[in-house]
Amino acid sequence: MTSAIIVAGGRGNRLGAAMPKQLLDLGGRTILQRSVGAFDTHPDVREIVVVLPADLVESGAQLVGATRLPCTCVAGGPRRQDSVRQGFARVSGDAAVILVHDAARPFVDHALIDRVIAAARESGAAVPALPARDTVKRVNLDRRETIETLARETIWLAQTPQGFRREVLARAAALSEGDPATDEAQLAERAGDTVRVVDGDPRNVKITTTDDLAAARASVTPPAPRVGTGYDLHRLVPDRPLVFAGLVVPFDRGPAGHSDGDVVSHAIVDAMLGACAGGDIGRLFPDRDPQWKDAPGLDLLARARAHVEARGWRAASVDVTVILERPKLAPFIDDIRARLAGVLRLPVEHVSVKAKTNEGVDAIGRGDAIAAHAVAVLVPGDRS
């Protein structure tokens, strides 16, 4: 059985917030809730112990939120090592491997937890770490002078969770009442146990400063939706089909154009491309290119959708207004919406199509032309 101790007993004074940093919002959940959630959803973890400031233990269940696993909240001590010792005292006796994780690292993922558990089972203790990338100096703090330049390849930056077989953490906890230690791996080293290093994760950052918090919030806040507008206009001429989203509507004239003149599809293409700053329909499907001669509007729309998705966006809704004097489109609107929804991969209720006349004004009002205006809303999609 694997148990997790989440250390959240500090106040985060370096952050300068009015509340403990682990309770600050991070994309709709607190830092603490995100850290707890990573272990609560891990298949090998069977219980969680959360160490909180003493005055917050009573409201611990509310602060942590609903969990799948049994979760106990306990009061921490004046030092981190004291808080871990308090948490260890509440871990189930059935726990063979115990993970210790800083609540201030809310981006830990299952792959990292897997590596730590496997190494702790095999070696007794494990710490994730990243190799130092910069040249490392040991410095005289009083004089701000270099004492020694350390071999960079031997310097690794430790993260959490750190994992221990039960008997190893028990020996470390027995030493924790003595001299200060920065983490449990250091106490395990003092007890004579071997601590194995596994690959850490650059994303597993610790939130300590206001800059850290701002960067963390930026990473979990999706880009705002984008809105684009589109417009298409064609003359109506004899011997051309009148097409809307691939549906041919009976009429004695149709739109003149290089492609099929589908004003509904074309206007949506422009709106989607505009929303993601992806150019326009003329740039993507130039009328000088013979491959687009008489190209179906729905085909262009499908290609434009793929183009938008490749840029990391997807359509959330579209709204189209068709302007023409005749024929009446009311009997065909539902079919047009369904066709558009299929190509855009949207629920049909997210697709709106309306038809208006131009009240007899100009070429559209005389029945010599047809136009469409479109609005498309894009939201972040799968960028993989």
Image (tube, rainbow, N blue to C red):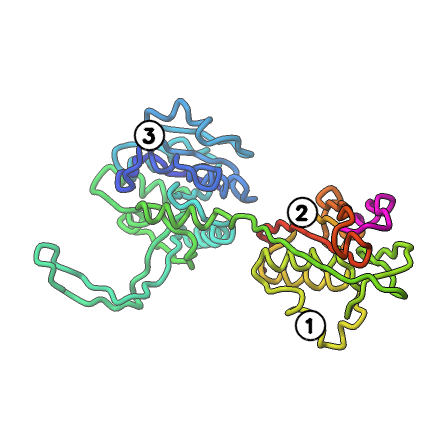
- Residue 44 in sight from this viewpoint: yes
User: Height in image: 166 above or below 129?
Assistant: above
- Where are the magenta residues, as a range? 323-338
Q: Nearer the viewer, residue 217 or 12?
A: 217
- The residue tagged 2 is 317
Classify 10 Å Cα crowding around label 1: few (below 14), some (14-19), many (20 and above). Answer: some
On screen, residue 300 versus residue 151, left or right, reads right
* Amino acid bearing label 3: Pro
- The residue tagged 3 is 53
- Quarter occupied by the C terminus: bottom right
Q: Which residue is drawn at 42% across and 54% down?
A: 123
Secondary structure of residue under mark 2: strand
On screen, residue 136 versus residue 288, left or right, reads left
* Amino acid bearing label 2: Ser
Classify 10 Å Cα crowding around label 2: few (below 14), some (14-19), many (20 and above). Answer: many
- Spatial CA span between label 1 and label 2: 26 Å
- The residue tagged 1 is 286
User: Height in image: 111 above or below 173?
Assistant: below
Secondary structure of residue under mark 1: loop
> Closer to the observer: label 1 or label 2?
1
- Spatial CA span between label 3 and label 2: 47 Å
Q: Where is residue 155 in the image (x, y as percent from the top left)?
A: 29, 62
Q: Upstream in the sequence, badge 3 or badge 2?
A: 3
Q: Which residue is drawn at 35% across and 38% down?
A: 21
* Amino acid bearing label 1: Pro
Tell me whether the residue at label 1 lies in contact with that at label 2, contact meaning CB atoms closer than 8 angstroms: no
On screen, residue 267 versus residue 218, left or right, reads right
Q: Position of residue 249 (x, y in %)?
A: 88, 54
